[in-house]
Amino acid sequence: MNTKLFSDLGLSPEVLKAIDKLGYEQAAPIQAAAIPVLMQGKDVVGQSQTGSGKTAAFAIPAIEKVDPAKRAVQVLVLCPTRELAVQVSEEIHKLAIFKRGLHVLPVYGGQSYERQLQGLRQGTHIVIGTPGRVMDHMRRGTLKLDAVKMVILDEVDVMLNMGFREDIESILQTTPKDRQTVVFSATIPKPIQDLIKKHANNPQQVRIEQTAKTVPTVDQVYYEVDRRNKIDLLTRLIDIHDFKLGVIFCNTKNMVDELVEHLNARGYSADRLHGDMNQAQRDKVMTRFRKSGLEFLVATDVAARGIDVDDVEVVFNYDLPYDGEDYVHRIGRTGRKGRSGRAISFASGREVFLIRNIEKYTNKRIERGRPPTAGEVAEARTNATLDKLRATLTSGEYKRSDHLIERLLEEGFNSTDIASALLHHLQGGETAPAKPVAPKTPAPAKFERPPPPPKRNTPTPIQHPPTAPARPQTAPQKEKVSRAVPKGKTRLWMSIGEEMNVAPLDIVNAITEGTGLPGKIVGTIDIRERHLFADVSTPHVKDIVARMNKTEIKGHRVKVKEA
């Protein structure tokens, strides 16, 4: 497998800074192979599957070749659907965030012409569009392609199957003949070969060859889940299977850091392993993991190369890997020396296609799992509690507290109530098994939080600390007490609250996914009836406000401003 660091690919400091902000440590195989060739100005034909990292493979050279001082369209990316056009546009935006003056615009059917015209008039440098809408703008004279340096055809096989052959031909004929032509496709049938032969100039073939492998002792399953619900599904699966030693893989350093914070806040023992850590730090974490001082190790692919622990019960692909070979490397961390193991993968949206690619690579079907309900998780926890109590009662190895029980009996409490109260505290003091009550904090729409497992520490939700208790002579106040903003933080007001069934984790996820920033930049969150306040890191306020004002949370469009 061809692996390189992005710093080895001759990229500008601005692009490397954006890549580092996104948390990527190394180039995916298709990126390592295609970027150097594209940076040399050569035409490229890349054969690559969905989810392999091909968008960055062509987006990074495209950004590098744009001259921001020249107010004209210099790069054109054609995509088969508006969904893919939006996805490609978002990724290019993130990679070009530190390139001052560079403008990116998606154009596709179903969106207002006026909005697209305004963007084109402002001097857009990179246009990402569907063939039909691009042709419409060309006919209207609102899109000029005479200054185009690079044309990229993304998923050209899909575009041809959708009947865009004539549109693509017309668009290519309008662009300068000395342009750079880039073609990406999962397959290269004869119609695509003919198109390449007619419009490309001695293109270089970029294809990542893979050798099928599999791990027979590992039980493999995937769950289709929205990215915002991943953490809730992860903790449910951990609890219902009572996993005690596992590795969780993420694609970026930022995601590793954020997930470790969430797991520790919920009472699980987790630590991180990624490329920003020095060798001494890595050795310390691995020593704890080998000695079962940790339950879960959250890691990136680069950092995880040296993980060699025989008793790992489960590997979670929290983020799906770029290719089948990385998948096999990951799940090979469990099921060692004849032991059985589990590999659990999460897929959202288009990533389901990547599951199919992995199946072809491993020549093994990955079953789709049904997410456990909150009731099933609660039942599993109850059974675990009863098993521990039975074992303790059978062994007789516990300190007698007869005098305390007798005192409670003398006060009029019966034995059943006393036992239930003790179980209530044993399970974290939230819900007694016999009489469950509704949680005070609104739960996420799809994955409400069941009580914490007895074997772990009491979870600490990501929310504001409780206010100090009122003095005896002061009447309780309905409104929450205002508090000072911590140093280095700025308080934001958001137009969403308890009535919309929003939880603190929804806000953290929305900010991190919308901006690409780590979860640690979010501080205290105060949720009120129809609005909330969130403390965020001051240097990132403008970016957060700009991105969040374009975001929906729980189906509600959010307005955000400084409080």
Image: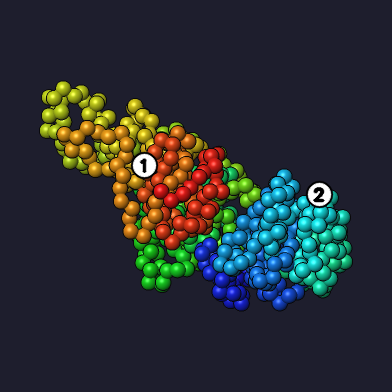
Residue occupying the point 30% across, 48% down: 483
Question: Viewer-proximal residue, 291 or 111?
Answer: 111
Kind of element beneath mark 2: loop
**Residue 263 location (% of width, % of height):** 41, 51
Q: Are marks 1 and 2 in contact (CB under 8 Å)?
A: no
Is 300 on the left or on the right of 261, as rendered?
A: right
Query: Is disc 1 surrounded by few (<14), some (14 to 19) or many (20+) residues within 10 Å?
Result: many
Residue pointed to by mark 1:
453
Would residue 34 be visible to someone looking at this image?
Answer: no
Is 513 on the left or on the right of 456, as rendered?
A: right
Q: CA distance from mark 1 to mark 2?
A: 51 Å
Residue occupying the point 46% across, 59% down: 540
Among the two numbered marks 1 and 2 on one chain, the one whose residue lies closer to the N terminus = 2
User: Residue 41, relative to residue 484: is it above or below?
Assistant: below
Is 448 on the left or on the right of 369, as rendered?
A: left
Give the quadrant of the N terminus.
bottom right
Q: In the picture, residue 240 is in which quadrant?
A: top left
Residue occupying the point 20% across, 41% down: 398
Residue pointed to by mark 2:
162
Kind of element beneath mark 1: loop
**Residue 506 location (% of width, % of height):** 47, 45
Residue occupying the point 48% across, 47% down: 560
Would residue 467 be visible to someone looking at this image?
Answer: yes
**Residue 123 location (% of width, % of height):** 69, 63
User: Residue 420, relative to residue 359: is it above or below?
Assistant: above
Q: In the picture, residue 64 is in which quadrant?
A: bottom right
Q: In the picture, residue 117 is in which quadrant?
A: bottom right
The mark closer to the camera, 1 or 2, is 2
Question: Viewer-proximal residue, 227 or 524?
Answer: 524
**Residue 430 location (% of width, % of height):** 32, 36
